[in-house]
Image: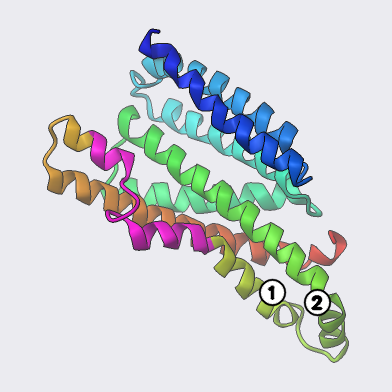
Amino acid sequence: MSIEYKFLFAYVLILISVYISYREKIGLEKEILINSIRAFIQLLILGYALIFILKLSNVFELFGILFVMIVFAVYTAVKRVSIHDGVKIAFLSIFLSSFIIIGTLVLTNVLSLKANEIIPIGGMIIGNSLNAYTQTIERFKSDVKNNVDLIENLIALGLPLKEAFRFQIKNSIKAALIPILNNLQTLGIIWIPGITAGMVLAGANPIHAVFFQLVIMCSMVAVAVLTSYFATNLSYKKILWSI
């Protein structure tokens, strides 16, 4: 069999996941299956689209593509976690955090305005922002729901609204940072990043590859912190309407 089609055997792993979800009544069978097929289609389209995208040099076109990524991230976030005024909160959280990180990298010349740099790195930053947002809001809603009586009592006693949510905000941000901090702690020992390995295999200086990956990891941590911060500070006034 041609190597181009061997990847289809990876879908055996999807079927295993679907089976476990079905057996344990988790209820994610349909979502796992549909999203895995959609991922294949999206990657197939991306493979051909990159031929065109990586030739772009106009700044407005590059940032236009990043903006489209942000819009799709917001759409995904709103579908994943429901909250009152969710579109506005998701957009501001993801847009502001991604804009700050990408803007900082560009202004410091760490990242150049070239399609082969800003598009893939920007996509990683926006994707990590999406993950941080959904994890933060999901945990925030859960913690507030479990402590709603205590929060209402604190508010009734005259405590400022944000202070009444202090512990839930802190726990939500910490929960959102667990995955990226795990990656940061195990970087180079357990988790071997594809970009570092790819650059070394392509003949790049290993030190340059390491430095580039470190920039990416720092960006991932920063965008997760900023997104969680924006998400909780924009939603705490409306969170009680969402549980």
Disc 2 is placed on an element classified as loop
Is residue 46 among the parts visible in the rendering?
Answer: no
Kindly identify which residue carries mark 2: 147
**In the displayed structure image, the side of residue 230 where residue 84 appears, left or right:** right
Q: Residues within 10 Å of mark 1 (few under 14, many from 20)?
A: many
Kindly identify which residue carries mark 1: 168
Instruction: Say which label, 2 or 1, has the lower sequence index.
Output: 2
Magenta stretch prevailing secondary structure: helix
Q: Quadrant of the C terminus?
A: bottom right
**In the displayed structure image, the side of residue 225 where residue 165 appears, left or right:** right
Viewer-side residue, 214 vs 13: 13
**In the displayed structure image, the side of residue 57 where residue 146 appears, left or right:** right
Viewer-side residue, 13 vs 223: 13
Q: Which x, y percent locates residue 92?
A: 62, 51
Q: Which x, y percent locates residue 224?
A: 50, 57
Image vertical order of residue 167 relative to residue 110, above or below:
below
User: Which of the 4 image quadrants contains residue 29?
Assistant: top right
